[in-house]
Image (cartoon, rainbow, N blue to C red):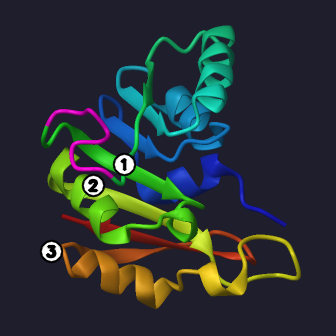
Amino acid sequence: MFVDPSSILKQFGIAEGMHVGDIGAGSGHYTLALAQLLRTGKVYAIDVQRDLLERLKSEARGRGYGNVEIVWANAEKPRGTKLVDHSLDACIISNVLFQIEDKDAFIQEIKRIIKPGGKILVVDWTDSFDGMGPKSTDVVTQGKAIELFTRYGFRKMGDVSAGAHHYGIILTS
């Protein structure tokens, strides 16, 4: 039913040595897949839920991934990710947009931390599916997501196949 993060990341074009932020890392499916791909790069797992980050930190260590940095932060606040300006080559935002209250502040923070020409992968729900996924009032459609990001100077580069219930888009700064 759902696409594996590794297959989505292959479509996104992750390269060795990149610094990538998993914004809203949650349980870390993308963080762990990124850590495996980026042996010489760095993955920043960013989330507001400290308990999830602690579990993710433990799992990354258990798998021998020394390239994961856990960042307890609120990406909806100015400088909330605690990262240096223009420090990331790419960002992953998966199943997060529908949960964000201040989407403008969130995208402004992404704009601050992504390098010029950096890439963003947005994966989110296409709809509400009878209790699976967000409430229908919280769904951020693909068109709305593109509109939000283009408002801040991002442009759409392409799409990724993200399964039957999700869309995937690649944007650049």
Residue drawn at x 56%, y 70% is 98
In the image, 122 versus 78, the foreground residue is: 78
Residue placed under numbered mark 3 in the picture = 153
Residue 166 position within the rendered picture, expressed as x and y whole percent measured from the top left: 65, 74
Picture quadrant where residue 82 is located = top left
What residue would you read off at disc 1? 75
Q: Is residue 84 above or below residue 63?
A: below
Residue that carries the numbered disc 2 in the rendered image: 110
Label 1, residues with CA under 10 Å away: few <14, some 14-19, many ≥20 = many
Front residue of this view, candidates 131 and 127: 131
Say few, some or many: other residues with alpha carbon within 10 Å of mark 3 (under 14 / 14 to 19 / 20 or more): few
**Between disc 1 and disc 2, whose residue precedes?**
1
* Residue 73 image position (x, y, % from top left): 40, 36
Q: Are marks 1 and 2 in contact (CB under 8 Å)?
A: yes
Q: Is residue 69 left or right of residue 131?
A: left
User: Where does the magenta region start and end?
Assistant: 77-84
